[in-house]
Amino acid sequence: MKVREIAEKAELKILSMPDPEREVIGAYMGDLLSWVMGRAGESNVWITIMSNINVVAVASLADVSCVILSEGVELEEDVLNAAKEKGINILSTNLPSYETAIALSGMV
Amino acid sequence: MGEELVFTFDVDGDDFTSAGQASVQIKKNLRQLGINPEIIRRVSIAMYEGEINMVIHAGGGEATVKVCEDYIEIILKDSGPGIKNIDQAMQEGFSTAPDRIRSLGFGAGMGLPNMKRYTDSMEIDSTVGVGTTVVMRVNIV
Ligand SMILES: Nc1ncnc2c1ncn2[C@@H]1O[C@H](COP(=O)(O)OP(=O)(O)OP(=O)(O)O)[C@@H](O)[C@H]1O
Ligand SMILES: [Mg+2]
């Protein structure tokens, strides 16, 4: 499934979507950046509550298909701009991380 | 071929807003060279972890990437405090990152283990009070 479709089906808020056609394969949940770097797979959805600028670099280098900010976490303007510029898809939801993962089940 | 390509970056200490830039740039450069995406992913993740370590633990340093015919070499050199016990630092979960850094999501103690795991060879040369040099290689073939 594509990032665009997941956003629609799971009713996620779109914060940055420069690459809507990106294919999603699997998901990973975590907030410790180097843990995510080591374990997230290429094209995974990455569910996290971290929203600082380093998330953009990690998403780019781990090559995840999109970041989903759970728990209603918001994004600062400069982080949002960096995400758009680097081609990183960022979605958000008010659901907690666990419920976010459940909402994606069967799609990824 | 036979020619090696060298990229060098100054890595700024204490600047978390731009931390990781050298690695993001290298990823771009390697893509333009048509390197295999899986190799690029391994190189850029390993380099990112090393780059962040220089920012967090050593006040910055210098990153050099050499693209050779059979391998890509990443050299990270800093003049920070050095690593007292390398075996301990290499263990998953060991971290001396201060709280303010941990609140950004760093400090899992997974950086060095990731660097080892994503590369074909890794050597750390460190002297307390002098600095640390990490050399990693990822084979292309
Ligand atoms: N360049 C360096 N200079 C001095 N000490 C370092 C350097 N790199 C690593 N270390 C030491 O080794 C420890 C382990 O490093 P590692 O990258 O595995 O974890 P971390 O940086 O603390 O956390 P994480 O990488 O998971 O965010 C660090 O906490 C630090 O004490
Ligand atoms: Mg580290």
Image: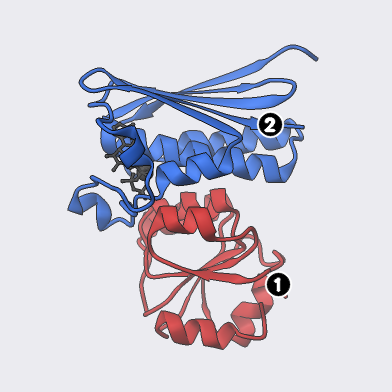
Chain colours: A red, B blue
Mark 1 chain = A
Locate the N terminus of chain B and report the quarter of the image it occupies.
top right
Image quadrant where residue B121 sits: top right
Tell me, for residue B139, which label it has, or none: 2
Image quadrant where residue A55 sits: bottom left
Find the distance from the CA under tag 2 to the CA under tag 1: 32 Å
* Three-letter amino acid code at the position of disc 1: Lys
**Marks 2 and 1 on same chain:** no
**What residue lies at 44% left-to-right and 83% top-to-bottom?**
A98
> Residue B37's spot in the image, x, y percent?
71, 44
Say if A106 sits above or below B124 in the image.
below
Quickly name the residue at label 1: A2
Horizontal placement of A108 versus A102: left or right? right
**What residue lies at 56% left-to-right and 63% top-to-bottom?**
A89
Locate the C terminus of chain B and report the quarter of the image it occupies.
top right
Residue situated in front as seen by the camera: B56 or B70: B70
Q: Residue furthest right?
A: B1
**What residue lies at 51% left-to-right and 40% top-to-bottom?**
B116
Horizontal placement of B141 versus B133: left or right? right
